[in-house]
Amino acid sequence: MELTDINTASRSGNVATLFDETARHHGDERAIEYHGESTTHAELRDRTAAFAGGLHDLGLEPGDRLLLFLPNCPAFLVASLGGFRAGVVISPINPQYKRREVASQLDDTDATAIVTHPSLRSVVDRAVADVGTELEVLTVESEHTDRDPEDAFFEAVRGEPTLVERDDDDVALLPYTSGTTGDPKGVRLTHRNTRAQLLWTLARSTQNVDPGDVRSLIWLPLYHITGFTHTALQPLVGGGTCYFRSALEWDPQACMQRIEDEAITHFVGVTAMYTDMVAADDFGEYDLTSLESVSEGGAKLSSAVQEAFETTAGVDIAEGYGLTETHGATHSQTDSTFGLQHGTIGQPLRMTDCKIVDDDGAEVPPGEAGELLVRGPQVMDGYHEMPDATEAAFTENGYFRTGDVARRDGTNYYEIVDRKKHVIVTGGYNVYPSELEALLLEHQAVADAAVVGIPDERRNEVPKAFVVPTDDAEPGDGVTARELREYCLDRIAAYKHPREIAFVDELPRTTSGKVRKYELERRHGAE
């Protein structure tokens, strides 16, 4: 497919028209493979168009919010692309979330409908009851055992083929992230933001594979912006094929076998995935040489793991950088002028303007560290119904404050040095300490709590909680570390729970009352 064709087809308006153009050029070619079942690009277009009509028949109007609480499956893509076509706003939810987390997003989005999976339906029902709202709950299931559940589901939510005109600045996607306070924030990503990221991949100068020949293995969760944008939508819009696997069923051997069997060309993973593959006893027995593009993000990969994987697969692992607020990548090693420079995040994408500034907002020279600011067509419109947070996130000149400390060298390669936000990156997932601290403080035996990240060989880092028990709940007499861990596991996603809990008499604080977390981190190192 020529880039000029797809640019002409969607220079503005509803981003779903990009996929119509894809179907025009690649209609008979495979778009999705899932457990042996295939869907062509033409079938995907027709199914999403009918789903959009079905949403309108259910009463959803342009601008309404449609939540997706699903594991990795074709239904996620059909519902999201169909939602775009219908003009509704798609808001994905982490399928590991529990009742209180789902209820929070239902309430904040004022959702009109939610698409979910049978295994998650009970969580949805309880969350809906908590919020006390009426909305359409659409479950990917069927009473007919001789039919594919997703086929039955999309036949039930089916109407006249529909495409609603949308303006560039209309919101298409509303994923949620958290800031330094840990309070969830809905990120308003527009049709322009989405189109900018999708067209970038077709314009890349270093493509080793024609976009139509890309075979992308999707194991990252689709609710996450990297999984959705970079492992699914970008390959699809170029005419490539997406091979689905559930992010909740990670299996390093199955991943490598899939790469070999399907001659996968593109794979994006997090540090733990590569660590697990290299650690597998039969690692060297799989043929991984079909890989042309392999990327990693979320945390630094150990040199030993990186070298072992690259030697076996015959391809370099490229790092990149991006945020939910930037709809994914702002920097990439893959398309950098001088190739991969390990230890860096590469150079800014051609559509991205960025700079590094000191605490006064003055730009610093190469080699000096400061906060990374970015600006470009992929950067969010703002936070959902949070005008103060939106204003604080941008400079007067429209640069987004990433909150990350970075530096660049003389060839414009960037390196992330540290995080200004107290984010714990564990296995590629972000954990916000304040959310975990607030939950711990709800326990009747906890008087005070602080959470920090501690090193972990496999997951990069994991949460550790320092807990001050109440006077009547001393350790071993009414409260234990195990009890608190189970308390957390019952209420939040498993990856967020504290792997270690230390009981202390008090937390070190500044005169203004803020916890000196660096002292807790140092205390852990001395233990």
Image: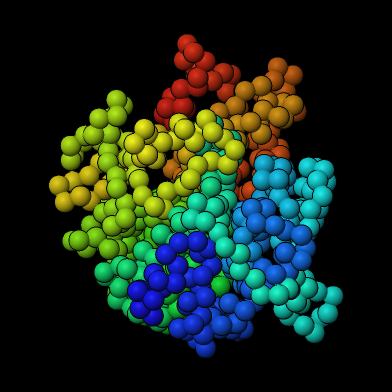
The number of callouts visible is 0
Place of residue 7 in the rendered image (x, y in percent of width and height, measured from the top left): 39, 69
* Residue 253 visible in the shown view: no
Image location of residue 240, percent across then percent down = 45, 78
Q: Nearer the viewer, residue 243 or 80?
A: 80
**Left or right position of 124 against 403:** right
Q: Residue furthest bottom?
A: 28
**Quarter occupied by residue 441:** top right
Residue drawn at point x = 36 percent, y = 64 percent: 200
Relative image position of residue 117 (x, y in whole percent): 72, 64
Position of the N terminus by quadrant:
bottom left
Q: Residue 220: where, in percent of width, then height?
A: 51, 62
Q: Is residue 356 at all visible to an observer of this figure?
A: yes
- Picture layout, residue 131 above or below residue 348: above
Q: Is residue 88 left or right of residue 217?
A: right
Q: Residue at x 34, y 44 (%)?
A: 374
Direction left: furthest residue: 410
Between 58 and 322, the one nearer to me in the picture: 58
Q: Is residue 410 left or right of residue 426?
A: left
Q: How is the protein colored in the picture? A: rainbow
- Residue 136 appears in which quarter of the rendering? bottom right
Q: Quadrant location of residue 185?
A: top right
* 287 relative position to 21: left or right: left
Picture residue at 23% right of the left edge, 51% below the top: 413
Depicted 271 relative to depicted 431: above or below: below
Residue at (46% x, 56% y) in the render: 192
